Amino acid sequence: AVARTFAVHQHPVDALSRYLVNRGRYPWTPTVRTPLGAVRPSIYSQQDVFTLNEIFCRYDYGSGAPRIVVDLGANIGLASFFFLTRRADSVVYASEPVQRNLERLRMNLGPFVGRFHVDERAVSTRGGQADFLVEETGRLGGLSEFSDGREGDTITVDCVPIAELIGGILEREGRVDLVKIDTEGNEKVLVDAIPSDMRNSIGAIVWENNDGTVRWWRGGRQTA
C-alpha cells in the first residue's frame, strides 16, 4: 500500500502524513492517478483518508475493472469513485441512507453523471423502517441492531431487502460483475440473504467482516 501511494497520489508525502499522523486540514482534494486520468475526490477527515488508502492503494476491493458494480454502504462514494475510474463504460449502483454522506457522494461522483445510480435506503434482509446509528465521521454508521456498542446518534431510515435491490439491478442489466458490501455489521447476513439463483448472475461479492478482514465470494465459493 505504501508503494502504491507513490504511484497513485500526485503528492504522496502529503497523503502519507495525513494517513499516519493526521496532518493537514479538511476538506482535502488530493490529485489521484487513475486509468482514466487524474481526478480529485473530496476527503473530509482522516477516516476518509483511511478509506481512500484501503481502496486505491491497498486494493481491498480488488484491482480489476468490473463493468457493473453494486456498492452497498457507499458512504461518501470513494469505492464507487474507484470503480468508475477503472474503465470508461463502468456503471455503479450505490446505496447509502445518511444524508450528509449522500451529499458528499453526489459531489464526488459529479464527473460521472449518467454512469451511477443512487438508492437512499439502507440495505437489509427486510423492508420497512429501522433505527440507524450515525457517528461523527460518517464512516462507521450502520443499522443499530448490528452496531455492537458503537456510540452515535440514531436516525430512522427506510430499508430495502437485498434480494429486491439486486433483483431489480439484474433485471435492468442482466448481470452484475461485482457486489461490494461495507455496511458496518450485517455484511455476512446480507451475503447469506442473496438467493442462490441470483448468485449465478453475479461475478463476485466482496465484503468486510466485523474483524476488519476482507472476504470474497467467487465462482461458488468463499475465499480470504
Image: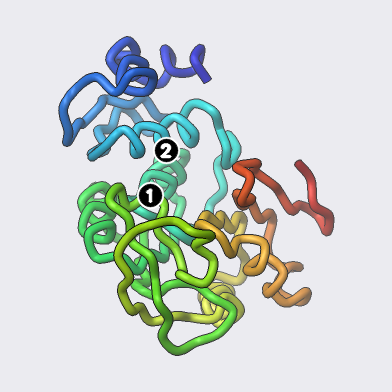
Pointer 2 residue: 51
For marks 1 and 2, give the CA distance.
Answer: 8 Å
* Amino acid type at mark 2: Thr
Foreground pick, 204 / 3 = 3
Residue 8 can be seen in this image: yes
Relative to 165, residue 77 above or below:
above
Horizontal side of 131 relative to 11 (left or right) equals right
* Residue 191 image point, x, y percent: 67, 65
* Residue 9 image point, x, y percent: 35, 19
Relative to 10, residue 89 above or below:
below
Relative to 11, residue 205 above or below:
below
Horizontal side of 180 relative to 92 (left or right) equals right
Task: Please identify the quarter of the rendering in which residue 25 is found.
Answer: top left
Residue at point 69%, 47% (across, down)? 215
- Farthest-out residue, bottom: 128
Residue at point 46%, 45% (across, down)? 83
- Residue 139: which disc? 1
Residue at point 33%, 18% (across, down)? 21
